[in-house]
Image (cartoon, rainbow, N blue to C red):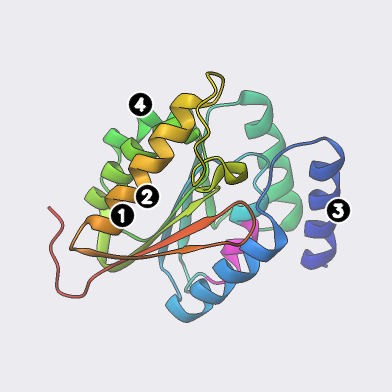
Amino acid sequence: MIKEELEKIKQKALNDHIPIIMDDTLEVVDKILREKKPERILEIGTAIGYSAMCFSEYLQKDGKIDTIERDEERVQEARINIEKVGVSEKINIYFGDAVEILPTLDEKYDIVFIDAAKGKYPFFLKEALRMMKPDGIILADNVLYKGYVMSDYNKHKQRTAVRNLREYIKEVTQNPNIETEILEVGDGLAVSRIRKNVCIM
């Protein structure tokens, strides 16, 4: 039943051109979550709640997902969807701009999933690192951004997003406290694992 509802929500999102996590990316994330069995997940970028609902299956008993979305219409749709799928008690939506909300959070998370404004990824990373549990994992979607990030793309329209995604990749691959793989699934997924026994802050 849950799977059927999720499939309907996914199809509606695709028909309405609302960006949601791609199937091959979700497959990789599912595998990570299945192994990790997280207690707390932070998602930056809720959209209509599709990915949070998919992730909720892998939470420990009484586990929780905090997810942030600044588009009011999408928040309303996400709440309806989450209710429909029957996972309201597992997912908490913060309505507002992640840049303002993140510094107010003081939780510790096993997993952080970043899928919001591409130009803000370095800021999201800084905040994620502050809130990671030891051995936590940061997942950043769309890091290759239509192939622009690894090319010599420099057109004005997407310049800031591309520059900041490059900065994000540089930070997660050069930080000695983090072990990162950049996977060519979907639009690029960065999987960054905090090295064991490392205190980030």
Q: Which residues are magenta?
A: 53-58
Q: Closer to us: mark 4 or mark 1? A: 1
Does the magenta-highlighted stretch encompass residue 6?
no
Instruction: Give, as a three-letter code, the residue at label 3.
Output: Lys
In this image, 179 relative to 152: left or right?
Answer: left
Circle 3 is placed at which residue position?
Answer: 8
For disc 1, the marked residue is 172
Residue 191 is situated, as x and y percent measured from the top left of the image, at: 43, 63
Could you classify mark 2 by the number of other residues whose Cα lies within 10 Å: few (under 14), some (14-19), or many (20 or more)?
many
Instruction: Say whether residue 56 is magenta.
Output: yes
Of residues 133 and 142, the one drawn nearer to the viewer in this rendering: 142
Residue 39: x percent and y percent?
41, 67
Give me the C-alpha separation between circle 2 and circle 3.
34 Å
Kindly indicate whether the residue at mark 3 contacts the one at mark 1 (C-beta within 8 angstroms): no
Q: Earlier in the sequence, mark 2 or mark 3?
A: 3
108 sits to left or right of 183: left
- In space, the residues marked 1 and 3 are separated at their CA atoms by 35 Å
Residue 159: image x %, image y %? 48, 25
Residue at image position (31%, 54%) is 172
